[in-house]
Image: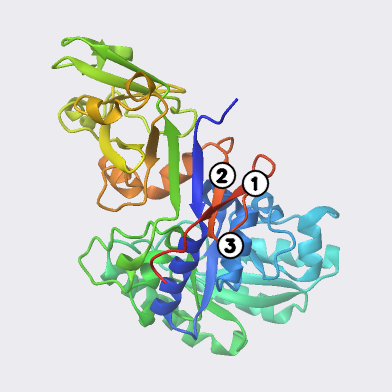
Amino acid sequence: MSDNSLISVDFDAVDHNMRVVRGAVGPGVAINAVVKADAYGLGAARMARRLVQAGASMLTVYSPAQAEALEGMPCPVLILQPVSRIERGGSIHSMLVSGRLHLVVHDIHHVAELIVLAHEHGVRLPIHLEVDTGLARGGCTPDDAARILQAVAANPSLTLAGVMTHFSHAKTSAERCAAQMRTFDLFVDAHRALIPPECLLHAASTYASLRGSAVHAGMVRVGIAWTGYAVDGPEDGESILGYSDFRAAIRWTSSLIHVRRIARGTSVGYGWAWNARRDSTIGLVPVGYADGYPTLCTDSPQLAREQAEPSRWVRISVGDWSAEAPVIGAVNMDQICVDLTGLEQMLAGQPNGGLGAEVELYGTDRAARNYLPTIASRLGMRSYELLCRLNPRIPRVAIEAAAPLGRVEQGSFRLAVRAAPDVP
């Protein structure tokens, strides 16, 4: 038995990407690495350790369940979701008691619940106050935030570890980011007496953190940056520091398991969404939407253009040779078809004209049509979505220069050797 596909995670690229972030924000700004949703499906525990080694001084998750995977991390873990109760025993309680668990307070009623929580567990609870400056999601208005600051200052069970906000247009509008930052700065300046000197101020996520020091405050929160997929740049045309230097850290591969010839006029797959306009060679790859490979909705505008302008491509490799091939027809639960027409001579060295050739579903070459952000853009999606869709059952391999080879339990990483990276 062999795995149908494999996800390789390049830890050297992750290190490089963290250096890019450090270069953009400078030495005086802390880096908070966001590892929500199991580090976007790449394995939170292993990835968090690497991110801390690479310079992260705090980690962020969304829920208590996600925080459990980070027990034993040497740095604080911030939970964004409103939390009002924590059960005794277990890893979350241990993190709470040790002072490494930080919670976000979202409104005046929530701060009262956190005071009760701190009393119940006999701890002084580090909290981060989220001020809503325009996202209108979590957090509270500046007026309510002022009342919360007073409540925190008056209660010894709570300590103000951070004051934060979240930009609504981090990628798309420098003007909107600047407006929210002005609101945030005005709030902080008006309430300096209630904000301890050691309290961390933070506002910028990945794209905002690359817009310059005006939005850096004391800490930036980066997620898509460390994966290397923040390479598409700002949508408002502003120059962003270092975004073009990121290196993709994820590569998803499978293989051809069946190759056949079909006659001109033959339709392929459910709904006959693709029709052979010439005698063709098609290949079968054993991955599908159950593995997280993206599909097209039946009412998607792209569907009508799909045959002439394929949205999804793969790279077929045999030895030193490789070529791109479009995905054709409907994506199935556990298989996709690709058009190999014109590649027969190159595949001739393989059994059955290509059987066993490597298929790279998501690659690391920005210029290739199977580059994850490129596929996401064509489908009207975000890179985050494609990453988070990757099924946890797909084995992950951690790629490091001079690392030993060894298989570990499912859900963890395997290690593999490769040459030292070209980029220092």
The reply to whether discs 2 and 1 touch (Cβ–Cβ < 8 Å) is yes
Residue at the spot of label 3: 60
Q: Residues within 10 Å of mark 2 (few under 14, many from 20)?
A: many
Secondary structure beneath label 1: loop
Residue at the spot of label 1: 412
- What label sits on residue 304 in the rendered view? none
Residue at the spot of label 2: 396
Secondary structure beneath label 2: strand
Q: Residues within 10 Å of mark 3 (few under 14, many from 20)?
A: many
Residue 371 horizontal/vertical position (percent):
32, 47
Quarter residue 194 falls in: bottom right
Distance between the alpha carbons at the discs numbered 2 and 3: 22 Å
Residue at position x 49%, y 34% in the image = 5
Examine the rendered structure and indicate whether residue 401 appears above or below residue 5: below
Examine the rendered structure and indicate whether residue 67 appears above or below residue 108: above
Q: Of label 2 and label 1, which has the lower sequence position?
A: 2
Residue at position x 57%, y 65% in the image = 51
Residue 104 horizontal/vertical position (percent):
61, 64
**For the image shown, how many numbered marks are present on the structure?**
3
Mark toward the viewer: 2 or 3? 2
Quadrant of the snapshot with the N terminus: top right
* 28 vs 328, nearest the viewer: 328
At label 1, the amino acid type is: Ser
Judging from the image, the colouring scheme is rainbow
The reply to whether discs 2 and 3 touch (Cβ–Cβ < 8 Å) is no
At label 3, the amino acid type is: Thr
Q: Of label 2 and label 3, which has the lower sequence position?
A: 3
